Amino acid sequence: MADTDIAFPTLSAADIAALRARGTVRHAKAGEVLWHEGDRRFPLFVVLSGAVDIIEHTSAGERIVTRHDPGAFTGDVDMLTGRGSVIEGRMVEEGDVLALESADLRRILSELPVLGETMMRAFLMRRTLLLDSGFEGLKIIGSRFSPATHTLVDFCSRNAVPYTLLDLERDAEAEGLLRTMGVKACETPVVIGRDGTWRSNPSVGDLAEYVGLVYAMAPDEVYDLVVVGAGPAGLAASVYAASEGLRTLTVDSTAVGGQAGTSSRIENYLGFPMGISGADLAMNAMMQAEKFGADISVPCVATGLRIQGGERVVRLNTGVELRARAVVVASGIEYRRLDVPRLRELEGAGIYYSATEMEARLCAGEPAVIVGGGNSAGQAAVFLGGRAREVHLVIRGNDLGKSMSRYLIDRIEGMSNVRLHTMSEVSALDGEQFLRAVTLRSSDTGREETIAARALFIFIGTVPNTRWLRDCVALDDKGFVLTGTALDPAQRGGEAWRLANRAPLFLETSLPGVFAAGDARSGSVKRVASAVGEGSMAISFVHAHLGMTK
Ligand SMILES: Cc1cc2nc3c(=O)[nH]c(=O)nc-3n(C[C@H](O)[C@H](O)[C@H](O)COP(=O)(O)OP(=O)(O)OC[C@H]3O[C@@H](n4cnc5c(N)ncnc54)[C@H](O)[C@@H]3O)c2cc1C
């Protein structure tokens, strides 16, 4: 089936009859705006008669993205995510539309699975086609060499927020726009919204607010479950919890997808014989969780956790406290930093901890250096090898086979532009505002070699994202969260356990009703499949805990 057939199916009379029973028919005049850009939680419309145009407001004026005739339906992924709409819907020919509110849509997706699948596939494909069509989205004006610009661009691309980067170094339009707005280059990066308003050097929190990513939390609400971390473990927990009727809120400090979301291609996750990109896996999982009614809020950093009365309280960096009957900790791990002078200064300005499409664009046609001998480094070498002029893969040992899967080694060996530096480490970084060169030192000979590379990718092991839990739950000596039988008797004692009157369940931490899943958990296998497995499994223990505390 062609992509456009998937994106724009025509509903059958039977489908429309089933939908009619769940929505409200109304008449709309030509020219009526059904929803504006930026609107949230507006209805999905099935066109019964007349026609609806989907319009993008570009800098050059209006662009009609598509026209929906009778039998078609409006909507894309934001129908479920609740984010602000990136396009406008306008009636162009007077007629009747069937309006389905977001709650109606969720019911349809669960009660009419075949029709629901058609709609979900259409939503996902529409977003892909929209982005491929040169959709402008937000405009970010800044230098591609600036860490602040990189932070904003990274946030948008990891959170599937459509954007266009106008690079001060390359795009003539960038300077012209700044002049028109009366903004100096030192005030960049500047983000221009689709309504023409702009902000100078916003934080990611401001940007998220601006594009409607932040979920409006009700401070008095007691959730059945709060999930901290929206990587594979947290998303799996959210899908299972929401689908089993638990009122679920999931928060993430950075982006949906976690580490997996930064992978260019995951090839060993069951059910995807051709592999799946981390970005697609994250988007699909997010839609699945939201389809069942989970709310997801990004960016939202958990800074502490405690039990208060019968509730678990998760404190956020904003000062907001989330109350829940149970918590799943799925905050994963993050990459270690290299111990080399000037590293912090150049992070985001040539030094990266993930190799996605965005970073690949920055080093296209230029040399890139990757440090690390694990599978993440291997995937990055294969991916960047297709884009960079040459890739230097640097490992401290003498044998890639000790830490990397054979399939990746075979691919790397088959790439003529990937050069392996064994027994080597990075000894110096050079560059003013942006990385210009990386010096490698051989631990065998002490000889140094300087590579004129504008990108250095670091994949040298990990540390758990559990600093926020340090005084809250028991951690092992490396900082991973202890659960179940790994807790020693002292960690399973105390008032909370006396009141619970039971032993910790498998995946339960030293606080009753607080569970841990995925890479952050002590003893877990650091893989997508195991994180997904643990996240799903945690929900059966959440039910057991809730059942025992009724
Ligand atoms: C580049 C790369 C490629 C990989 N490729 C593969 C592969 O091919 N196959 C495979 O099986 N595995 C692969 N892995 C490993 C796999 O991605 C991880 O095992 C998996 O993502 C772990 O999932 P998780 O949910 O436990 O944690 P994570 O994915 O680490 O997610 C944790 C989430 O928690 C959030 N968070 C952290 N602290 C806080 C806080 N205080 N408050 C709120 N949120 C917080 C983070 O932002 C993050 O989104 C790869 C990893 C990387 C980095």
Image (cartoon, grey):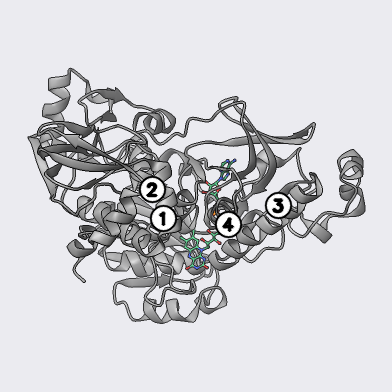
Q: Residue at x 24, y 54 (%)?
A: 126
Residue 451 position, x and y percent, is 34, 58
Tag of residue 240: 4
* Image position, residue 359 (x, y; %): 33, 53
Front in this rendered view, residue 116 or 249: 116
Residue 139 located left or right of residue 118: left
Q: CA distance from mark 2 to mark 4?
A: 19 Å
> Disc 1 and disc 2: Cα gap in Å?
6 Å
Q: Which residue is mark 1?
A: 109
Q: Nearer the viewer, mark 3 or mark 1?
A: 1
Q: What amino acid does circle 4 point to? A: Tyr
Callout 1: helix, strand or loop? helix
- Between discs 2 and 3, the one toward the N terminus: 2
Q: Amino acid at mark 1?
A: Leu
For residue 105, the mark is 2
The answer to whether mark 2 and mark 3 are in CB contact below 8 A is: no
What amino acid is labelled 3 in the image?
Val
> For mark 3, what is the residue?
542
The disc labelled 2 sits on which kind of residue? Answer: Leu
